[in-house]
Amino acid sequence: MAHSHPPEESHAGLDLTLRIWRQPAAAAGGEFQEYRLQGISPDMSFLEMLDVLNEQLIARNEEPVAFDHDCREGICGACGMVINGQPHGPEPQSTTCQLHMRTFQSGDVITIEPWRARSFPVVRDLVVDRSALDRIQQAGGYVSVNTGQAPDGNTLLIGRTVQEGAMDAAACIGCGACVAACKNASAMLFLAAKVSHLAQLPQGNPERTQRVLGMVTQHDGEGFGNCSNTSECEAACPAKISISHIAKLNREYVRASVAARY
């Protein structure tokens, strides 16, 4: 008796056109350039696809595309780029390195550009300077502790609800997708996560007032815009930081502003 077999799946690769922002230096002008790739495996990550492109460019003695990457596991937040108008690409709440080429179809045109924000100046191609976020963190995102032997873990008991709320905020990886997604280029979601994390813990109480005042001042001084509650930041955030932390930030700021007067 003859047996029928299911048709084999096609493993043909993807043929793609890439429109990539090329900018040789911070002070230089930039423009989109087109590249064509053939036979890209749908199982590749987006960054692996860019690796293939760069290998081909190097083989042709052309300048490879500069882009940030590190862990390639969705942890470090380095792989920031705007893909077809969306920070980190079309997959919601994920990083670029977690985006796979199976998301696209053969024949697609993919536009790739850096974060677009005055506070994130382009260094080269898809690489931007995100040190403004570091300076916000340095303005107050820390706690003072006595050095020496680690305290007993049960010295400060923290309830489960508080602990989970603080950990949800601490999950922020500082990638800057919230800034790239916001029409005002605001870093409020990043700022709120850092303030809310420590504001919920007893370890954060000693610097509570000066922390939020210092970090908000630094945020504004870096040129980031204001929050207008469109929630695009939450939709783009790979760490799934809730905009409820922005409400917490606002309450902390009002409290600190009143306290600073007395």
Image (cartoon, rainbow, N blue to C red):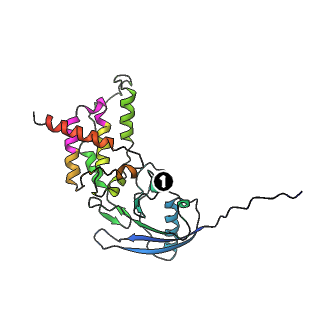
Q: Residue at x 39, y 25 (%)?
A: 153
Q: Quadrant of residue 62?
A: bottom left
The quarter of the picture where the N terminus appears is bottom right
Compared across the picture, whether 217 is left or right of 60 comes to: left
Q: Indicate the secondary structure of the residue bearing disc 1.
A: loop
Q: In which quarter of the image is the C terminus?
A: top left
Q: Which amino acid does label 1 sit on?
A: Arg
Mark 1 — residue? 72
The residue located at (14%, 36%) in the rendering is 258
Q: In which quarter of the image is residue 79?
A: bottom left
Q: Is residue 31 visible?
A: yes
Where is residue 171 drawn, in percent x and y?
A: 39, 42
Where is residue 92 shown, x and y percent of the image?
A: 45, 53
249 in magenta: no
Question: Is 235 on the left or on the right of 188, as rendered?
Answer: right
Specify few, some or many for label 1: CA neighbours under 10 Å numbering under 14, 14-19, or 20 or more.
some
Asked if residue 217 lies left or right of residue 166, the reply is left
Q: Which residue lies furthest to the left in this view?
A: 262
Q: Give the range drawn in magenta.
A: 198-214
What is the magenta segment's predominant secondary structure? helix
